[in-house]
Image (cartoon, helix red, strand yellow):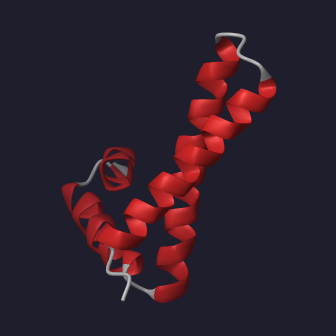
Amino acid sequence: MASAIIGFYTESLWGGVISFLGILIAWFLPFIGTAMMIGISGTYSWLAFQILDGFHVHGAICFLVAAMVFLTSFGSHVMTAGGE
């Protein structure tokens, strides 16, 4: 998705292709890939918290669901990205 946004912003197909390859390579670097996984998982949990908060669910339940979403998402990213 980020490479499509970059390609659209630069109005260049090659800008999108090069950013896609750069993101793909960075995903498998130990520290950068971990930071990207934490960022994506944090975004998912933040969205879950905001959606539940929008329905006026109690804050503790919102936080519990957000924590479960973060841990599940991070675990699935680790398992699919080659946690050895």
Which quarter of the picture shows residue 48? top right
Instruction: Relative to 56, say whether 46 is above or below.
Output: below
Residue at left offset 78%, top offset 31%:
60
Rendered view: 84 above or below 37: below
Residue 42, given in percent of the width and then of the height, sits at 60, 51
Which residue sits at x=27%, y=73%?
21
- Where is residue 17? Give x, y as percent: 22, 64
| Front position in the image: 8 or 25 | 25
- Point out residue 13 in the picture as x, y percentages from the top left corner: 20, 55
Give the left or right position of residue 68, taking residue 3 as reference: right
Does 10 sit above or below residue 36?
above
Question: How many circles with numbers are drawn on the protein?
Answer: 0
Q: Quadrant of residue 35?
A: bottom right
Q: Quadrant of the C terminus?
A: bottom left
| Residue 22 vs residue 57, the one in the foreground | 57
Judge from the rendering whether residue 64 lies leftward or rightward of residue 10; answer left or right: right
Which residue is at the front of the view, 68 or 13? 68
Q: Is residue 43 visible in the rendered structure shown here?
A: no
Looking at the image, residue 16 lies above or below residue 64: below
Please tell me which residue is depicted at 66% across the width and 14% down the height of the picture: 54
Locate residue 33, reporting x and y percent: 47, 76
* Residue 74 showing in the rendered view: yes
Q: Which residue occupies the extreme top position in the image?
A: 55
